[in-house]
Amino acid sequence: MSNPSIVCQQCKEPLQLDASLVDLAPSAYDTIIASLPPRSSSTHARHATDTEKLEQLSAPSSVKEVWKKSTSSVAPLSPKAQGKQPQINSLSPNDSFVLLQDSVVHHTPSVSTPLRAKKGSIKAKGLTSPAPVSKPPEPVAPHPPPLSHHLRSTVRLFNLISSRTDIDHPLCAECTQVLLVSLQRQLDETKKERDGYIAFEKEVRKERERESQGLSKEEAEKKIEKLKLDEQLAIKQLKEAEKERQQLDEELRILEQEEKMLELDEASFWRNHNDNILATDQQTAQLATLRAAYAADSVVLEKLERTNVYNDAFCIGHDGVFGTINGLRLGRVPGVPVEWAEINAAWGQTLLLLHTIARKLDYKFESYRLIPMGSFSRIERTAGDKASYELYGSGHMGRLLHNRRFDFGMVAFIDCLKSLIDYIKSQDPSVDFPHQISKDKIGDVSIKLQFNQEEAWTRSLRHVLLALKICLKWATNGVNG
């Protein structure tokens, strides 16, 4: 069981007293007191440092250097060991405690210790124990309890040990271990100091023997000459070292300038790098925008490529026996009255389609000029009499001359159509036209209306529209690839 009144004088932890100390017999107590070292104040002389001791000796400098080398290999304590170093009392010259060597005190950290009472008295946790020298012990109770009696005896024993040594007692096991390490180190230092003194003594004896023998004049001159040569060599080496130092200083200055230039270049490089990164990001964003626009435009283009405006502008089909263009019937048959206004408008669209195909193919007719004018379209001859033929008719049988000119206009139309078909076949022989054109006939029927049956005329007009549809398909698809 630990007693709160007894604590370690280093780490202030409560200690548990050993039974051998609690029940210590008076004879054993006297034996311990007798074994303690006597009080002495002569250790104050140890405060003088080793350097001061060495300077006080009358010995050559070479001998002193040997002694310094022999004692300079002592390693200091580690910071951890210094932290656990037991506290050494700092006493006045009037105290009779023995002080540690000055070198040990320098490595010992300053930690607050319990205040030791002067002139033999000590206070520890409210307990006062008399010192064994100055004063007689204080009177105690006539019948003290056994524990209090043994406690005071133990404290008195610790005070005696503390007064005869350099360490405050009691100590715990850990602090005791650190103390042992410190004492072992002091022992090693003392051994090295002893070896240094032995070496010092040997060198002193050798020096004295050498001085007793003395040097001859020749030896002294040789030694002086050797020292002069050594001096000259040392001066030369010093000059070379100074010169080398100046060169190194100049190189250092140049390197510092180069370093500054490199720092400026590096800063400029990083600025340019950042600018390039920003420009790259902007270009990447622009490229993404252009790619998106290109994709959208490609879709629109593909849609437009699939769209044929000519097919929308000139829709060729059929309505029963009639061929139609843009919904207008071209021809007449008995029993189906088709107005001439519709027929004339269909011929106007047919002529406009032939003119459009020729212009798209950049083809020019040699003998005729097409003049599309809706329901009143016509064809003019560019050679010969330069006659103009109307491409529209009427239902009046009395206008035979007009109907004749209408027949000449239709013959001129299929003549222009034949020349366009021949041009297309010259460009692409694979194009096949089912109906051949010869003079006024297309296929096996005549294009003329006079002296012809309406069914045959209507069939010939249907052949004309089929040929135009083939020409339009080739012009819009074959030429564009």
Image: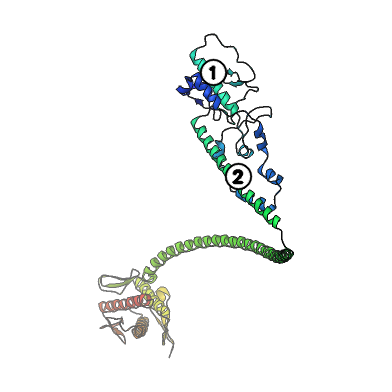
Based on the displayed image, in which of its 4 quarters is residue 438 positioned? bottom left
Residue 364 relative to residue 142: left or right? left
Q: Residue 7, image x and y in percent?
A: 53, 25
Residue 329's place in the image compared with 114, above or below, is below
Residue 144's place in the image compared with 457, above or below, is above
Residue 150 relative to residue 65: left or right? left
In what element is the residue under mark 1? Answer: helix
Q: Residue 332, image x and y in percent?
A: 29, 74
* Of residues 255 and 410, the one drawn nearer to the viewer in this rendering: 255
Which numbered dot is residue 193?
2
Q: Amino acid at mark 2?
A: Glu
**Which quadrant would the N terminus be assigned to in this image?**
top left
- Classify 10 Å Cα crowding around label 2: few (below 14), some (14-19), many (20 and above): some
Q: Which residue is label 1 attached to?
A: 152
Furthest residue toward bottom = 384
Based on the displayed image, in which of its 4 quarters is residue 391 positioned? bottom left
* Res. 5 in view: no
Residue beneath the point at 52% across and 15% down: 149
* Of residues 367 and 58, the one drawn nearer to the viewer in this rendering: 58
* Of residues 320 and 310, the one drawn nearer to the viewer in this rendering: 310
Based on the displayed image, in which of its 4 quarters is residue 187 positioned? top right
Which numbered dot is residue 366?
none
